[in-house]
Amino acid sequence: MQLRRSIALLNGAQTVGTGRTFWAGFAMVVLLAALLPVVADGFVANNIAYFLVWTFMALGLSLIWGYAGILSFGQTAFFGLAGYAYAVVTINAGDAHGLTWAALLVALAVSAVTAAVLGYFMFYGGVRDVFVGIVTLSVTLVFETFMAQTAGPEWAIGSARLNGFNGMNGMPSLTVPWPGQAIVLEGAPLFWFLLGLLVIVYLGLRMLVNSRFGNVLVAIRENPTRAEMLGYDIRRYQLSVFVIGSTLAGLSGVLYTTWGSYITPSSMGLNAAALPIIWVAAGGRKDLTASLVATLVLLWISQMLAVYGSQYALVLMGAILLLAVMVAPDGFVLAIANRLSNARQRHPSRKQPTGTAEQATASIKS
Amino acid sequence: MTTILETRQLRKRFGGLDAIQGIDLKVEPGELRCLIGPNGAGKSTLFKLILGNYPVSAGRVLFKGEDITDLTAHERVQRGMSIKFQVPGIFVHLSVAQNLIIALQQTVRGAAQQVELERLLALLDLAESRAKRAGELSHGQQQWLEIGMAIALAPALLLLDEPTAGMSPEETYKTGELVKHLNAQGMTVVAIEHDMTFVRQIAKKVTVLHFGRIFDEGPLEAIVASDDVARIYLGKA
């Protein structure tokens, strides 16, 4: 009964893409993706694994910004902190006995607790709208600046040197203890792990946004005062969603660190901070699927362009953001999806509300 | 029975302006009270103090005998009061049904929620518009939708701030009947209203506010007959 109710939440008012066609397409894409490491060479699979690494941060931002209306410009702070935390723990503890998984949990806890503390002061302190963006951006830049000056030998935690601007490297990958030979998540196993994790997180988030909790999030986004006047403690919801989204950014950070075996302060810099916003805004922040699709496509385009120099990709990303803001404020992917669904079912004509003028004061003795 | 709503020497100061200057208001359970007064009399401000949208400058607010002055707005709502704002406060980008569900999920869950949704849609005459975006509704329908959201919380006290603003005479009449129906079912209602036709239709007791004070209070007939009340409306007081 509980399971059936949860499954029903996969489709709902807060998610685009319902019905048989969508889910058949979804299953097909997942299946084809799963076959990729078998049919394509290792380079391609490794590249796509890199794209998958970032999707968790994008989904988290879609949740925070698109659903709850909180523009966080500093999700990279949680990405970087979790990456560093994973590096410090694994360099000290090694990869035996499933300790890399403990490191993963520690890293997620670090980003969750940091988000909880920061979020508490922001939301319970009455920080709103654009100021949340300014505060979160400042936080990520402060972390970047701090980590960049940790080059000296005094900046070490146990045997892990923080290495300043050059960042940390040489940390072990996620490793599954197995009788005989431990399974190191690299190459194809890492790809499958990321794909599986993405499917779980994506489906989980769909259930979340279509649940009672998700209803309250969009209510807060649409009209915070009304949401409050319906008896919801909006600060509590804002804090919760900020922690969930930021923990997902932390998850991306750990996966990035384990994927490339390095983490640097620039992962928390301005360029890095702007990218998730562009992916999510260009796709359609108010929908998880749109955000996910745009993230994968834009990462792929960025990488194609990076062959000719990384600056081209950044210029293009900036142009895409501008274009999205001007042409499709709700995102290109979402605009296309809406166009398709409108074509299928005739949309009732739009009517503007009329007669908003306040009624004139009537004479008491009319 | 305990007085459902009471304000004691309530005051609100905005900079140099004394918007509310010591109001003692008492509303008994089951009442249908109208709050009238010229523009700027402090009616909406009084509602905002009752609900906790503004902090009070002085005085206390009591709800069902409990001092709620220091509670946040959502805590007051959770205790059983609910409001329809002057300017429609609905979720314009969401569907009509979703607007109501967001309110309903505070009080009912599961299958009962669907039943309650249908009942509300029928009561508000919005059943055919359930899938429409709330922003596409006519102004009058938006007002009803917001009343629907307010009553979905099953409040003991319903505050209506100009529920008929911008409505046609037919819509105003229908709103009046809806308010009377809710009151007949036991909901205490306090309504701010300018439209005297509406006030005559629904009110039994009327409180007149003027310059942040209670100017007069009494049965509808007495207030309507009062020359003083007529004078303040014409700006001669």
Image: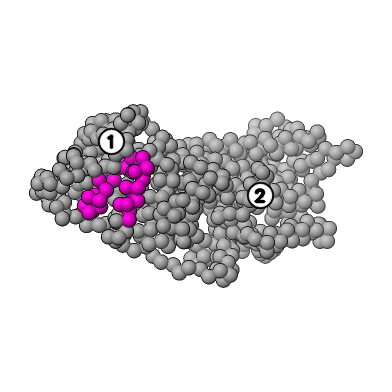
Where does the image place residue B211, in percent across and percent down from the top left?
A: 17, 42
Where does the image place residue B2, in percent across and percent down from the top left?
A: 32, 29
Tell me the chief SS of the magenta region.
helix
Q: Dividing the picture into quarters, in which one does residue A173 lie?
A: top right
Q: What separation in Å lies between label 2 and label 1 (alpha carbons)?
A: 47 Å
Residue A361 visible? The answer is: yes
Where does the image place residue B115, in percent across and percent down from the top left?
A: 51, 49
Is B103 on the left-hand or right-hand side of A85? left
Residue B86 visible? The answer is: no
At a point 52% along the width and 38% down the height, the residue shown is: A118
Highlighted range, magenta: B174-203
Is A192 on the left-hand or right-hand side of B137? right
Query: In the structure shown, which secondary structural element does the residue marked by tag 1 occupy?
Result: strand
Q: Dividing the picture into quarters, in which one does residue B28 lie?
A: top left
Query: Is residue B171 positioned above or below B202 on the image?
Result: below
Task: Please name the amino acid that badge 2 sits on.
Answer: Ile
At a point 68% along the width and 64% down the height, the residue shown is: A21
Q: Nearer the viewer, mark 2 or mark 1?
A: 1
The disc at residue B27 is: 1
Q: Which residue is mark 2?
A: A7
- What's the chain of the residue with tag 1? B
